[in-house]
Image (cartoon, rainbow, N blue to C red):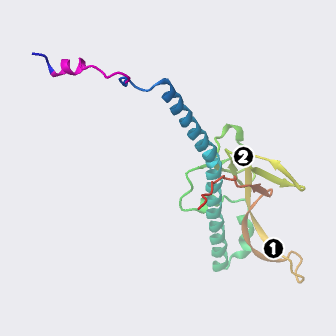
Amino acid sequence: MRSPLTRCQSTPVPRGVRRQRGFSMFEMVVYILAASILFAAAFNRYRDFPGEAERANFTAILAQLNATVNLQMMRLIASGTWNDAGQMEGRNPMDWLLTAPGNYVGAFAGIDEATLPRRIWYFDTSRGQLVYLADDASNLYLLQNGQRIATDSIRFGISNVYGSDAGSAGGNWQGIVLAPVVPYEWQAVELELQTIQP
């Protein structure tokens, strides 16, 4: 008696019908072509997300730092010691946060920025400035003398703001701010989102 396996293997194939043994060469080429087109479209669409994510993270931390500086200013006003606001200049605003961001690496004096990783904050104690080192600086510029100069770092400092007052030579104290040492512009990456037509 023959086994069912032997019977199945010996069943004749009708004329004109071939047994399928995997992908044909044509099917494989079509598959590779379709996968390549999909990969290229996805890569094109998402390649700018890391740079935009870095800019968004920077903006969020900067907003947190500005809120912290405002709280310190309110503390000075509430305690009646706003005349001592001058000693705030050159201080590290990261010290006023309950928890420093994960990408804050500490305070250093005269460190070579080339030795530091990117996407980090550090405090330059020799200048009294908070520094951000950008990883994707393709849209980051310093604004000096009406020109945009490409850069990969931005420096901030605590400074007192005085308003103009005709009655006093120096003007009235208006508060403390965390301001860029040199004005900067970090342009958003234009993300190409496809619109769906109804």
Label 2, label 1: how far apart the Cα atoms are: 33 Å
First reached walking from the N terminus: tag 2 or tag 1: 2
Above or below: residue 83 compared with residue 29: below
Residue found at the far left of this picture: 1
Magenta segment includes 13: yes
Q: Secondary structure at mark 1?
A: strand
Q: In this figure, which residue is indicated by the disc labeled 1?
A: 162
Q: Nearer the viewer, residue 188 or 175?
A: 188
User: Neighbour class for label 2 at 10 Å: few (<14), some, many (≥20)?
Assistant: some
Q: Residues within 10 Å of mark 1 (few under 14, many from 20)?
A: few
Residue 24 relative to residue 157: left or right: left
**What residue span does the magenta drawing correspond to?**
4-16
- Residue 64 position, x and y percent, is 61, 63
SS label for mark 2: loop
Q: Position of residue 125 (x, y in %)?
A: 70, 51
Residue occupying the point 14% across, 19% down: 3
Q: Residue at x 63, y 51 (%)?
A: 54
Q: Position of residue 109 (x, y in %)?
A: 70, 46
Can you identify the residue that label 2 sits on? 137
Look at the image and say whether residue 142 sits in the magenta stretch. Answer: no
For residue 60, what is the image quadrant? bottom right
CB within 8 Å, label 2 to label 1: no
